[in-house]
Image (cartoon, rainbow, N blue to C red):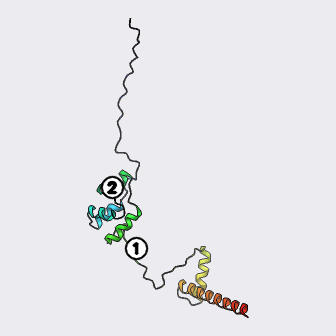
């Protein structure tokens, strides 16, 4: 006596096809800076790998390839790696080009943002006082301010010393 019941058969569903060409990474018009750098400066990938290995010992050609195809793999070169490339290869052009040094005599900078009406009024007064540029005017104002501060500091020291 066989009392086992057979399980009902379920019709098999059609197999689903996977779409491998769709990516959630960057759009197709993305230009990879690492690849651009390598091609524009005619640097072999092996040279880039050996340079980056100084900081990241496990960096290899496979990772290099993935970094050059960020839109597919989602892997990017670290900022430290880009700095190593700019120091090592002295790029002629491209995204990892080193900053040019500041060739101004005075290298420190001060800036502020003003509303349009205040800026226009200030420009008129600066020109009417005979200053050629805003930098000349601002520099003279800073020197006057510092001179006054030094003078009041000396006076304060002289008064307390008496």
Q: Which residue occupies 31% across, 65% down? A: 51
Neighbourhood count class around disc 2 (C-alpha, 10 Å): few under 14, some 14–19, many 20 upward: some
Neighbourhood count class around disc 1 (C-alpha, 10 Å): few under 14, some 14–19, many 20 upward: few
Can you give x and y, in whole percent of width and height, for residue 11 in the image?
37, 22
Q: Please tell me the numbered disc located at residue 4.
A: none
Placement of 12 over or under 123, stated as above or below:
above
Horizontal placement of 152 versus 6: left or right? Answer: right
Mark 2 to mark 1 CA distance (whole Å): 27 Å
Query: How many numbered circles are shown?
Result: 2
Residue 3 in which image quadrant: top left
Nearer to us: label 2 or label 1? 2
Query: Which residue is denoted by mark 1 in the rendering?
Result: 99
Can you give x and y, in whole percent of width and height, for residue 116 in the image?
59, 74
Placement of 68 over or under 2, stated as above or below:
below
Q: Which residue occupies 36% across, 25% down? A: 12
Q: Quarter holding the C terminus? A: bottom right
**Label 1 near label 2: C-beta < 8 Å?**
no
Q: Secondary structure at mark 1?
A: loop
Query: Which residue is denoted by mark 2 in the rendering?
Result: 63
Q: Which residue occupies 55% across, 77% down? A: 111
Placement of 161 over or under 123, stated as above or below:
below
Residue 14 in which image quadrant: top left
For the residue pair 27 and 33, the one nearer the viewer reads as 33
Q: Secondary structure at mark 2?
A: helix
Can you give x and y, in whole percent of width and height, for residue 64 in the image?
32, 57
Can you give x and y, in whole percent of width and height, for residue 90 in the image?
32, 72
Residue 30 in which image quadrant: bottom left
Horizontal placement of 11 versus 155: left or right? Answer: left
Q: Quarter holding the N terminus? A: top left
Horizontal placement of 156 versus 47: left or right? Answer: right
| Mark 2 or 1, nearer chain start | 2
């Amino acid at each position: 006596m066989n009392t086992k019941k057979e399980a009902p058969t379920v019709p098999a569903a059609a197999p689903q096809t996977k779409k491998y060409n769709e990516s959630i990474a960057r759009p197709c018009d993305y230009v990879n800076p690492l690849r651009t750098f390598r091609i524009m400066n005619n640097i072999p990938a092996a040279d880039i790998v050996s340079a980056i290995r100084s900081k990241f010992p496990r960096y290899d050609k496979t990772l290099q390839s993935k970094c050059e195809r960020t839109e597919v793999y989602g892997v990017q070169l670290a900022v430290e790696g880009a700095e190593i490339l700019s120091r090592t290869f002295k790029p002629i052009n491209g995204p990892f080009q080193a900053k040019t040094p500041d060739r101004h005599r005075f290298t420190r900078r001060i800036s502020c943002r003003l509303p349009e009406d205040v800026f226009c009024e200030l420009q008129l007064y600066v020109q009417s006082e005979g200053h050629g540029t805003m930098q000349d005017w601002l520099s003279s104002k800073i020197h006057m301010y510092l001179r006054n501060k030094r003078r009041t500091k000396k006076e304060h020291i002289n008064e307390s010393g008496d």
